[in-house]
Amino acid sequence: MAAPKGLQDAMRVNYDGVVALAASRSRAILYAVRSGILQGDPASGTLFVLAAHPFGQYLKRNLDGKKRGLSRWCADDLGSTVNNSRGLATLARVFRAARALAGLLIKPAKCFAIPLGDPSSGDLHSRAREALVAADPEWTAFPIVDSLEYLGVLMGPGVTLEMQWSAPLKKYVDRVGDIARSRADAHAAVLLYQERCIPVLAYKAQLAEPSPNLKRIERAQLPRLLRLPGSFLGDGEYHDLQSIGGPQITAAPLWCAASLIRAATTTLRSWPGAARGLRIAARRYLPLVRTICGTPWPAWWRSDAFATTLERAAKGDGESDRACAVRALRAALAAAAARPAHGEVRERERTIRPQSVLYLSLLRSSSHRVPPPLFPDSTSVSPVGSSGGLGSTPPTPRRSTGLLLPR
């Protein structure tokens, strides 16, 4: 449906013949403005949204709705995941329509492709390039990478926790240095620190666990902030200055932990479905040990999934890694041993019973308390012996711990 004619005429009057003028008295014309968001013009962004909205709805219906992928759009930043070549063809069709109907173009040099497959296959990038060219020959210029920053957060299989926090921590240190060079008094310096340094870390902390180096970096920067010798105060004493009349300094690690918990319990609402889908896919496609250890993603992913990080933060009950692993194991075995429908062969139940005895007996061999057996009424199978066969001698604790649950 076309926009009302009056709105079209008003926009033409405002945007026909737009030029950039020199700031001098001559007011000379520098160049004509023919594209982009006009600085200071709120209607320009609104017009972009009106032009792009139909294509976003098409993606939602034909990509997300038909289970070919997932697409998210924020302003002019579009991020999509696709399951197969049909999803890529859908994306290409949308971009061709946007160029023909609305004059919206993409710049291939600013578009990136991230293959999610196993990089050990060797030809992963070449196969990704072939898929891009098959969808649209112009996409041959897309750089293929293993990680990418999207809306301020690094994504992709190649991202590590150190890479995720590298830029925020550098910005944090730079801003502390700026405040220290201003030579403000202690109270003013702390006020600037709370306003300009701590929020730099809070944004990334909503999705990623705090950096293991954060406490050490904060300990090095606080004496610099207050212009004190590095060994003047001990660990933790900088956050207790208010007890002697000094300013109260927020602890950066605690602030980051609070930001993650708040995001998991209040701000973000869609992660439970993502975490549940991740576990289902892990039980279907990955080795069982990935589910047992609470890492339901492929081994070549170098950092935790955002959904799993948010799930741990929302749980917040102090459950140990071992108890979490045992609970995940029992859930996986219970799902695999579920009763099939009438007439279906019970092959799964016959194969899962030896697995349950194997893994639970290995877990029970350590000194930690574990839940009762999954099949308490099963007396036909004996515990697994240390030699790998069926017998009465349990395996040694050191061997079982090393096999299943990292210390």
Image (cartoon, helix red, strand yellow):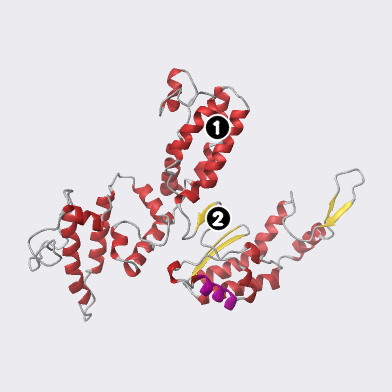
Per the image, the residue denoted by label 1 is 193
SS assignment at label 2: strand
Residue 62 visible? The answer is no
- Residue at 69% x, 66% y: name it: 104
Q: Is residue 131 magenta?
A: yes
Q: Position of residue 279 (x, y in %)?
A: 34, 62
In this rendering, the count of numbered labels is 2
Q: Position of residue 128 (x, y in %)?
A: 53, 72
CB within 8 Å, label 1 to label 2: no
Tell me the crowding category of disc 1: few under 14, some 14 to 19, or many 20 or more residues within 10 angstroms, Cα based. many
Residue numbers of the magenta segment: 125-135
Residue found at the far top of this picture: 244
Q: Is residue 137 magenta?
A: no
Per the image, the residue denoted by label 2 is 149
Q: Position of residue 203 (x, y in %)?
A: 51, 45
The prevailing secondary structure element of the residues shown in magenta is helix
Residue type beneath disc 1: Tyr
Image side of residue 367 versus residue 201, left or right: left
Q: How far apart are the two marked residues, 1 and 2, measured between alpha carbons?
A: 26 Å
Residue found at the far right of this picture: 26
Which quadrant would the N terminus be assigned to in this image? Answer: bottom right
Residue found at the far bottom of this picture: 343
SS assignment at label 1: helix
Q: Nearer the viewer, residue 279 or 46?
A: 279
Residue 94 visible? The answer is yes
- Residue at 50% x, 30% y: name it: 222
Q: Earlier in the sequence, mark 1 or mark 2?
A: 2
Image side of residue 23 versus residue 173, left or right: right
- Residue at 41% x, 62% y: name it: 300
Image side of residue 40 versus residue 306, left or right: right
